[in-house]
Image (cartoon, grey):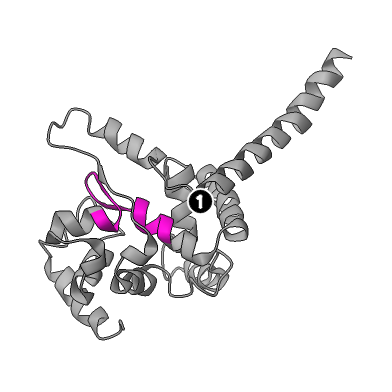
Amino acid sequence: MKKRKWTFKLFVMLPLLFITVSVGLVLLFKWVPVAYTPLMLKRAIEYRKDDTFHTTKKWVKLDDISKHMVNAVVLTEDQKFYTHNGFDWEEMQKMWDQHTKGLAKLRGCSTISQQTAKNLFTFGSSTWARKVWEAYWTYLIEKMWSKDRIMEVYLNIIEMGPGIYGAEAAAQHYYNCSASKLTREQAIAIAICLPNPLRMNPSKPTRYQLQRRATLLNQIQ
């Protein structure tokens, strides 16, 4: 009897509890601004011995973020953001085909929805287990949030430099302006750095960044 109760708790009650809590969290963040994320905690621990490191963030509504910034991240990070269901299956299939043919290494095909889920609900470790959890959270936010809410959360918590999170903090740090005032060029410069924000600096662009910025400026509205 005790074994049966233990089995029931392990395989029924615990999963139900997890689903209830996770759905509750997603519902909460559908309306409430995100104050802190696991990634912010992880970085704070990693840089705990660096006296120059400070966490900088400021939540702003999507309407208070330049449309250029929205267009820039869609262009550079996820061009099908407004049409997919959270996963770019076509891009993943393309990547897999190239990998199996020996033409390319396995690479991330994360959408903005997946990046939002990763930054909000995981510590961002590079493991298959994390990708599974990320997929679960991605499914939930796609089902329970609007695309605008996903974009709003993304642009407020995404890492945009050492200790810099969100478009408002980035705009103030790099260009001494608010996120609503970011120009096309500034938005593209920030978006280009998102794949590696700890090494790439919008205000100190490398030759690669300058070349990519010139190319993307011709594509962005």
Which residue corresponds to the image point at 37% horizontal and 41% vertical from the top-left?
Answer: 39
Q: Where is residue 194 in the image (x, y as percent from the top left)?
A: 29, 59
Left or right of 57? Residue 154 is right
Q: How many labels, in total?
A: 1
- On the rendered structure, is 71 left or right of 98? left
Q: Is residue 55 left or right of residue 33?
A: left
The quarter in which the N terminus is drawn is top right
Looking at the image, which is closer to me, 108 or 62? 62
Q: Label 1 sits on what residue type?
A: Trp
Query: Could you say where residue 135 lies in the image, as x and y percent from the top left?
Result: 57, 53
Residue farthest to the right?
A: 1
> Residue placed farthest to the top in the image?
2
Q: Is residue 85 visible?
A: yes
Task: Work out which quarter of the rendered image holds the C terminus and state it.
Answer: bottom left
User: Of residues 219 and 94, which is closer to you in this image?
Assistant: 219
Q: Position of residue 14 (x, y in %)?
A: 70, 30
Q: Is residue 200 above or below residue 93?
A: above
Tag 1 residue: 31
Rendering quarter of residue 201? bottom left
Residue 90: percent from left, percent from top: 55, 74
Residue that sits furthest to the bottom in the current view = 218
Q: Which corner quadrant of the image does residue 104 belong to?
A: bottom left
Q: Range of the magenta residues?
A: 152-168
Vertical order, 119 against 73 (above or below): above
For label 1, the crowd category at 10 Å Cα-Cα, with few meaning under 14, some 14 to 19 and many 20 or more, is few
- Going 74% across and 27% down the picture, which residue do you hit? 10
Q: Is mark 1 on a helix, strand or loop?
A: loop
| Residue 154 highlighted magenta (yes or no) | yes
